[in-house]
Image (tube, rainbow, N blue to C red):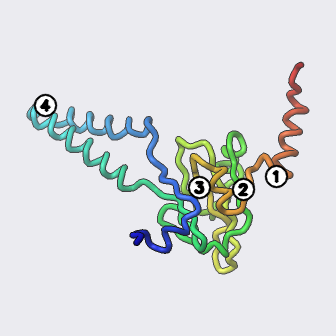
């Protein structure tokens, strides 16, 4: 007899967006600052304050790790969930085009789950006419797998992506 729920067996994609190594620099710096602020009063209290602040911030960071999950019926990105039937075109981006999606091409009403330490993003169009959100944009370490789970495609395989690649090749021809 299996202990897994029926919904768990329908998971097509699941990713936890863990903090990067560099992200841990900030709790460490804040803890050191807190310890130094208390140290003139009492050295032991300064050390204790630094350790307590570091542990508290580490727990907060680990408890707030967002999850992207695709099942047969739903898509969950962080704390938001939408039914799959309301997801239209799905396109994954890397590199320069991902940078543009997070900046120049970003719609102000889009739902975003972005992490600065991740290069790739996936754009998921929302087709529900009752929802004013045009699309969801999520950072991911595995855009190819996420787009495949949602029946999408990576940008470089779209017509626009092929055209952009051809234009870039014309501007910067490679020497033999």
* Label 3 crowd (10 A; few <14 / some 14-19 / many >=20): many
Among numbered discs 2 and 3, the one appearing first in the sequence: 2
Quick one: label 3 or label 4, which is nearer the N terminus?
A: 4
Of the image marks 3 and 1, the number of the one nearer the N terminus? 3
Q: Upstream in the sequence, badge 1 or badge 4?
A: 4
The quarter of the displayed image where residue 44 is located: top left
Q: Residues within 10 Å of mark 4 (few under 14, many from 20)?
A: few
Which residue is under mark 2? 91
Measure the C-alpha gap from mark 4 to mark 2: 55 Å
Report the residue that reaches farthest toward the front: 1
Q: Nearer the viewer, residue 75 or 79?
A: 75
Q: Which mark is residue 138?
A: 3
Task: Tell me the CA gap for discs 2 and 3.
Answer: 11 Å
Tell me the number on the disc at residue 173.
Answer: none
Task: Work out how far the residue at label 3 is from the one at label 1, CA to CA, in angstroms.
Answer: 19 Å
Relative to residue 61, is residue 131 drawn left or right? Answer: right
| Closer to the eye: label 3 or 1 | 1
For the residue labelled by badge 1, is the local secondary structure a helix, a strand or a loop? loop
CA neighbours of label 2 inside 10 A, class few (<14), some (14 to 19), many (20+): many
**Disc 2 + disc 3, Cβ < 8 Å:** no
Q: Which mark is residue 158?
A: 1
User: x, y (%) of residue 145?
Assistant: 64, 53
């Amino acid at each position: 007899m299996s202990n897994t729920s029926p919904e768990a067996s329908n998971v097509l994609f699941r990713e936890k967006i863990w903090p990067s190594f560099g992200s841990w620099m900030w709790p460490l710096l804040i803890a050191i600052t807190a310890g130094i602020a208390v140290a003139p009063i009492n050295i032991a209290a300064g050390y204790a304050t630094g350790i307590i602040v570091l542990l508290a911030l580490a727990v907060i960071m680990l408890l707030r790790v967002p999850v992207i999950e695709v099942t047969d019926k739903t898509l969950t990105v962080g704390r938001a969930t939408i039914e799959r039937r309301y997801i239209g075109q799905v396109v994954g981006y890397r590199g320069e085009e991902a940078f543009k999606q997070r900046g120049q091409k970003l719609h102000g009403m889009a739902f975003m789950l972005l992490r600065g330490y991740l290069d790739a993003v996936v754009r998921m169009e929302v087709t529900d006419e009752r929802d004013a959100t045009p699309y969801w944009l999520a950072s991911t370490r595995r855009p190819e797998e996420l787009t495949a789970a949602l029946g999408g495609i990576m940008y470089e395989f779209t017509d626009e992506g092929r055209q952009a690649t051809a234009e870039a090749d014309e501007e910067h021809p490679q020497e033999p």
